[in-house]
Image: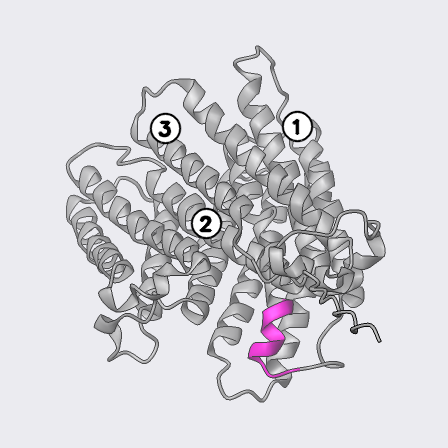
Amino acid sequence: MTAPRARRRVIQIRAADTGAAVPGTARWRAAHLLDAPHRLLFFAAALLWSAIAVWWAAVMAASPLGWTLPWAVAPAPAHALLMTLGFMPLFIAGFLFTAGPTWLRLAAPSVPSARTLRWPALSIVIGWGVLLPGLHLDARLAVAGLVAVALGWSALSGRFAGLVRISRADDRLHAKGLAIATVVIVLALWLAALALALEHVTLLRVATCLALWGGLASVFALAGHRLTPFFHPSIARRFETGLLGPVLAGLWLRGAADLAALWSWPWPMPLHVLLAVVHGLLGGMLLVTAFDASLARARRAPMVRLLHAGFVWLGVSFVLESLSQAVLAAGRPTGLGLAPLHALSLGFMATTLLAMASRVAAGQHGRTIAIDRTVLLMHVLLQGVTVLRLLVALWPSAPSGLLLSASFGFAALALAWTRRHAAWFGRPRADALS
């Protein structure tokens, strides 16, 4: 008799284990966008992000190239409107309808499917697609587009508020706060549409200010408090909600100051001093918290490192706001310009968005490695863009190439993220391909 042949052991390696897709195993199909809410809403958000970023890079390149662009809406408020309300809200919606039901202890059929969200999402995408050319050609076109966006967001906000209302979860603090923030975004959109219809630039600035401070920034603070350890340092253990209350109060104070400055300026020196002290104390506390020794182990995880960078930028933005108020108190009329704002928007919000959106996209697509080399390179690019934008704000005589480089870097980041993740959203889960 011959000896039995040894059985060959075959070990299969799944795509999910390496973080890479299996090439050529499935065609991209639009129908897969309806497999889950995050697929549909992240895909729509990514398209808008790319379109808006490329548009602004083209606007920045127009002057050096000698192009004269027509404008039906002033460029500065148009930029603020699109960068505030253009793409971030849809990313937020994708997160709300993915993580929100888990927080609220809800399951099907109570949770809206992607199919039921497709019309609001389509209304939002079409609306911004109409508004973009309207900014240059006819303000009435921009108004029509923004009305479509507001209608779509009203529907999404109403759906999420409905989930919060029917939930019986014990802890609904964050969900309730997020629901209120989405209502603020809806109000800001309708106010912006009215401002465009009336050709009222100040009212448009009010709308974007309301959306930024009362809507988007509040959402990121609430999400950060729920999902990261940095809002719960050892120095704040005596407070049940950690640093959430002080951070929200600081953000709303900055928003209130921005609104007040639209009608009343300049301010008396003591008021600037008071704001400098308040924001300086909060910024210092956030930076101390960011490097709390008790959180050293948590900061080693790749995902947490990215979120940590965003939290550091939050502290930096408050410190810069404090310095800006001090400079204003000293008699310099412009303070530090837009540096504190971009430290918040690009540094804190965009960094946090990049980390969280990449994590949700990878995890929901069956990939166990969410923060890989590609995401880290995108993160580094975003940090470079943020630093460039701050240099431009802090250096009034900076070469025009710095701002142009920042706009092109932001566009490259948007296109890279969209190219990678849009391919995932239209295909089955990676672990289903193995």
Tag of residue 136: 1
> Which residues, given as a range, are shown in magenta?
97-106
Mark 3 secondary-structure assignment: helix
Q: CA distance from mark 3 to mark 1?
A: 26 Å
Q: Where does residue 419 sit, x and y in percent of width and height?
A: 67, 41
Q: Nearer the viewer, mark 3 or mark 1?
A: 3
Q: Residues within 10 Å of mark 1 (few under 14, many from 20)?
A: some
Task: Assign the C terminus to one quadrant of the image.
Answer: bottom right
Q: CA distance from mark 2 to mark 3?
A: 19 Å
Name the residue carrying label 3: 392
Amino acid type for the residue under numbered disc 3:
Val
Q: Residues within 10 Å of mark 2 (few under 14, many from 20)?
A: many
Q: Is residue 262 visible?
A: no
Q: Where does residue 253 sit, x and y in percent of width and height?
A: 33, 57
Amino acid type for the residue under numbered disc 1:
His
Residues at marks 2 and 3 touching, judged by CB atoms closer than 8 Å: no
Q: Nearer the viewer, mark 2 or mark 1?
A: 2
Q: Is residue 294 magenta?
A: no
Q: Is residue 274 left or right of residue 52?
A: left
Mark 1 secondary-structure assignment: helix
Residue sitting nearer the eye, 430 or 389: 430
Q: Residue furthest front?
A: 1
Q: Residue at x 35, y 60 (%)?
A: 299
Q: Residue at x 73, y 37 (%)?
A: 141
Q: Where does residue 158 sit, x and y in percent of width and height?
A: 66, 70
Mark 2 secondary-structure assignment: helix
Tag of residue 284: none
Name the residue carrying label 2: 351
| Mark 3 or mark 1: whose residue is earlier in sequence | 1
